[in-house]
Amino acid sequence: MTDRNLEEAIYQLQKLNTENGIEQLLEEAAQLYSSGRHIEAGALMEKAEAMMAAAAAGHPVPAAVRAVVSHSNAWNAAAPPGATPRAATADKELERGQVDEQITAQIAAKLADGLAKILIGAFHELEIHLVGESRKVAHSFQEQLERLQATVESLVQLQTRFAHLTEAVSEQRSTSVALGEKYNQLAQTVTSLEQTTSRHQSELAGLRGETKDLSAIVGQHVDTLAARLGLHLEELSGLKTTVSDISRKVAGFIERLDRQAEVIRSLNDVQARRAAALDDVLGVLARLKAPDQPLVAAAGQI
């Protein structure tokens, strides 16, 4: 019986039954229902229905005593003169006990049926509730498993990316080591070029002392070469500071340095040719000085 049906049943029985026992049970059931104790109210309703069923069967609880008394009076009126009132009282008490036992048995059976129905309904609702909760829990577990699976897959992808990143870092380190070696080689080359330049400057200083004009020209060339070397050194130092940040341009820088090295080598070749030319000029000057002395002697004789 649902809560709505129970409320309607209490209301209908209160209108139909005015007997004291049933009315008290109905009032108590209404109070229990209003206070939220629906199961106890349902039990009282089952008890009231059992009493009504007993009354409908001809054994109402309040009228039982009246029925027994009327029956005993009729029996005393029809009894023979020799019958004693004590025997009538014993029969009356026996019949009253039988009626009470029948009413009690009917009420107990009705209450048992009602309680069984209530318990069955409660267990059914509990089963439905447990099934729903188990489904919710299973669905929640399924969602959590799916989330965990997605997390595991993302972790696997992250691990793969981390492995690729580690390989890239290793390659970058090897590339940096190779670039460092190339830079050391370039530094050694620049050092040798500086030494060569200083040696050339000393040689040019000696030549400058012999021929002022040639020394001026050579000095200009040396200054130009020194300026170019300074520019090359600045470019190399800038390349050293930026090689870690712009590694993708290292190949271009190396090619550029190679071109600069070729320019320096060509300058060295030019300088060597100029030195050879200076030697040739000095030889020519020496040869020019040598014929002047016979000419002076001949002029003196004339």
Image: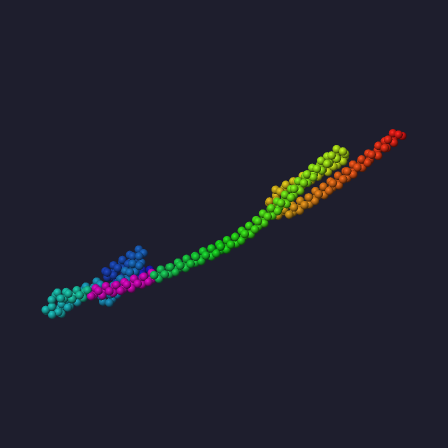
In the rendered view, would you say 168 is above or below 98?
above
Place residue 208 in its image quadrant: top right
Question: What residue is at 44 percent from the left and 58 percent from the top?
Answer: 142
Question: What residue is at 67 percent from the left and 44 percent from the top?
Answer: 257
Query: Can you give x and y, in whole percent of width and height, for residue 27 in the image?
Result: 27, 58
Query: Can you give x and y, in whole percent of width and height, for residue 63 in the image?
Result: 20, 64
Place residue 293 in its image quadrant: top right
Place residue 244 in its image quadrant: top right
Q: Is residue 118 magenta?
A: yes
Question: What residue is at 35 percent from the left and 60 percent from the top?
Answer: 126
Q: Is residue 222 magenta?
A: no
Query: Can you give x and y, in whole percent of width and height, for residue 179 in the image?
Result: 62, 46
- The quarter of the rendered structure image containing the N terminus is bottom left
Q: Tell which of 197 and 108 is nearer to you.
A: 197
Q: Is residue 5 visible?
A: no
Query: Can you give x and y, in whole percent of width and height, for residue 102 in the image?
Result: 22, 65
Question: What residue is at 33 percent from the left and 60 percent from the top?
Answer: 3
Q: Is residue 117 visible?
A: yes
Q: In the displayed image of the protein, which residue is found farthest to the left?
A: 82
The kind of secondary structure the magenta stretch mainly shows is helix
Total labels drawn: 0
In the rendered view, would you say 88 is above or below 133?
below
Q: Tell which of 108 and 22 is nearer to you.
A: 108
- The quarter of the rendered structure image containing the C terminus is top right
Q: Tell me where the magenta segment starts and ends, as one range.
A: 98-122
